[in-house]
């Protein structure tokens, strides 16, 4: 079966105002299959968040190819890109800031449904259902982001992300801003959702223990390149590359 | 301890709300009065009666009469129509169009952004009233041209503000989330950018009403605004300034009107700013 997401030779070069080049992502290739949980780990500045931004097309790709569900979305824009977002959604690092401070959480979730052609009434009902699926009471639909805790906001953000029934969910440090117990709850929710909707996860993370528990496969990034790839147990227990060893030793 | 803080906060919010209602009502009254000024004048503001010229305030003419015997109270009331409504029109115009230019800059490519912003810098660097004088001199006097001249030099402030606010919003994760939720550029601007940047722009506009009223009156005072016999506060003061020593009421009445309305709008602007400050919210 074709992978949900196929990334080939992805490259991103940033240009500073002084004209200097910075290669943030260099020749990165990987694939995510249906229902798979793939993690990208690496230190800060290794380019893992840039990969997430490139895959979601929030940043323009310098070189390479991104294929989502068999469609090349490397240069997609407008309607085509919007179509891609029906299959791919992202959960952001900062829970409260991923919602418009002047809109309620319910509005944020319903907006997504409305943009994809649901009527106002349908969107409202669906929003309540999604909140329930993500373990939030119906009254959260009427709350503003600053009236909910980080964990609650993140649940709402997950509800928004699964609203369009995507096949791929990208989690950019989605649990880093939460404390340990809330983190465990969110992970439990993600596991449950994966079983229900056969979601694939691309998990951008720097918490190695969490990756070991949660993910099937792991990519280790260093200075913009993938230095090691493999089953997460295997890579974390028996790292082959010197960098991976150092990264793991520094944590465990 | 925390209980005490909460109560202080509550009291402050409550008194802020009272202040807002108070100044809002005053400003509303002023605008309403200027709008219906033609019904409020006790005398015809254009009717000359040389027999009564330069009469001191009396029961018949509460603020006296000017050198042509026109009732000063009626002229001040009729003048509010020109002064206040044109100021509001001017501020509404520059805040809306300046903001649109700013949002457009933030969204457009680097080249266009740079071009518009350097143009804005040029307007900002130019001494305002001098530029307005030049424009008014080229286009001729008249209220319309004075408004146009002031609009030409005042929009950059709003363009800069809207641009920087929009750029700041663009960086926030919720914008990316909204983009991924399928919002097009226009949808993003309408639903997310505008509501989030409206606060600071509204406050600037409110505080600008006073300044613009002064500048408009200033232009009229210099003879580049309203043409006589149209009553306008600035030109009324200018017309009668040589009577200040002998018949002070003809100059003081429009001057006081400017003073009071500028103060009301400034205080309202201050209060709105405090009100929109997130620290003063629950």
Image: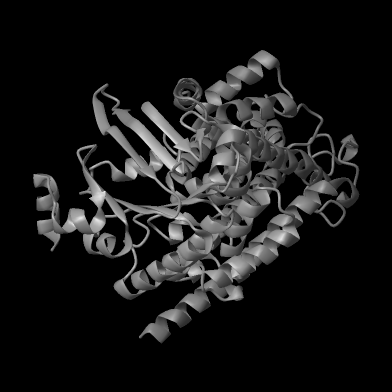
Q: Is residue A121 left or right of residue A15?
A: right
Residue A179 lies, in percent from the top left, at 31, 71
Residue A14 lies, in percent from the top left, at 31, 29
Q: Residue furthest front?
A: A1
Q: Nearer the viewer, residue A2 or B282?
A: A2
Q: Quadrant of residue A60?
A: top left
The answer to whether residue B151 shows anywhere in this view is: yes
Residue at 45% x, 61% y: name it.
Answer: A96
Way the structure is coloured: one colour
The answer to whether residue B204 shows anywhere in this view is: no
Residue B192 lies, in percent from the top left, at 57, 48
Residue B68 lies, in percent from the top left, at 83, 34
Q: Is residue B56 left or right of residue B138?
A: right
Residue at 53% x, 46% y: name it.
Answer: B180
Total count of labels: 0
Residue at 62% x, 68% y: name it.
Answer: A129
Q: Vertically, is A60 above or below B281?
A: above
Quarter of the image with the C terminus of chain A in it: bottom left
Q: Residue furthest top?
A: B138
Q: Nearer the viewer, residue A210 or B232?
A: A210
Q: Vertically, is A184 above or below B134?
A: below
Q: Is residue B282 left or right of residue A203?
A: right
Q: Vertically, is B274 above or below B261?
A: below
Q: Nearer the viewer, residue A203 or B185?
A: A203
């Amino acid at each position: 079966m074709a992978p949900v997401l196929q990334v080939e030779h992805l490259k991103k070069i940033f240009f500073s105002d002084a004209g200097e080049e910075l290669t943030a992502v260099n020749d990165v290739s990987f694939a995510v299959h249906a229902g798979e949980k793939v993690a990208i780990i690496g230190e800060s500045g290794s380019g893992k968040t840039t990969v997430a931004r490139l895959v979601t097309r929030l940043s323009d790709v310098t070189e390479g190819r991104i294929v989502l569900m068999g469609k090349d979305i490397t240069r997609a824009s407008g309607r085509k890109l919007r179509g891609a977002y029906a299959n791919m959604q992202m959960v952001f690092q900062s829970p409260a800031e991923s919602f418009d401070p002047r809109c309620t959480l319910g509005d944020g979730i319903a907006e997504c449904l409305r943009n994809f052609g649901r009527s106002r009434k349908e969107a409202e009902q669906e929003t309540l259902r999604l909140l329930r699926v993500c373990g939030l009471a119906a009254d959260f639909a009427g709350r503003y982001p600053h009236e909910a805790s980080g964990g609650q906001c993140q649940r709402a953000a997950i509800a928004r992300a699964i609203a369009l029934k995507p096949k791929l969910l990208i989690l950019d440090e989605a649990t880093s801003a939460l404390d340990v117990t809330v983190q465990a709850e969110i992970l439990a929710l993600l596991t449950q959702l994966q079983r229900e909707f056969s979601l694939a996860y691309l998990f951008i993370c720097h918490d190695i223990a969490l990756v070991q528990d949660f993910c099937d496969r792991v990519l280790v990034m260093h200075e913009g390149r993938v230095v090691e790839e493999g089953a997460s147990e295997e890579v974390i227990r028996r790292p082959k590359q010197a960098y991976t060893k150092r990264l793991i030793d520094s944590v465990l | 301890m925390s209980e005490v803080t909460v109560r202080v906060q509550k009291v402050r919010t409550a008194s802020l709300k009272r202040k807002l209602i108070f100044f809002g009502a005053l400003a509303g009254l002023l605008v309403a009065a200027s709008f219906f000024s033609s019904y409020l004048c006790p005398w015809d503001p254009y009717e000359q009666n040389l027999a009564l010229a330069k009469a001191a305030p009396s029961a018949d003419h509460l603020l006296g009469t000017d050198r042509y015997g026109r009732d000063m109270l009626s002229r001040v009331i009729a003048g509010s129509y020109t002064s206040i409504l044109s100021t509001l029109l001017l501020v509404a115009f520059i805040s809306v169009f300046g903001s649109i230019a700013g949002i457009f800059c933030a969204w457009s490519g680097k080249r266009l952004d740079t071009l518009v912003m350097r143009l804005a810098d040029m307007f900002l660097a130019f001494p305002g009233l001098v530029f307005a004088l030049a424009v008014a001199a080229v286009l001729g006097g008249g209220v319309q041209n004075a408004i146009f001249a002031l609009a030409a030099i005042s929009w950059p402030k709003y363009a800069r503000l809207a641009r920087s606010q929009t750029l700041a919003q663009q960086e926030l994760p919720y914008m990316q989330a909204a983009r991924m939720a399928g919002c097009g550029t226009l949808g993003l601007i309408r639903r997310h950018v505008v509501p989030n940047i409206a606060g600071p722009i509204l406050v600037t506009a409110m505080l600008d009403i006073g300044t613009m009223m002064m500048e408009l009156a200033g232009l009229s005072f210099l003879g580049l605004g309203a043409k006589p016999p149209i009553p306008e506060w600035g030109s009324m003061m200018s017309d009668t300034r040589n009577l200040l020593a002998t018949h002070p009421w003809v100059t003081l009445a429009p001057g006081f009107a400017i003073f009071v309305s500028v103060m009301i709008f400034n205080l309202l602007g201050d209060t709105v700013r405090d009100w929109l400050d997130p620290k003063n919210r629950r």
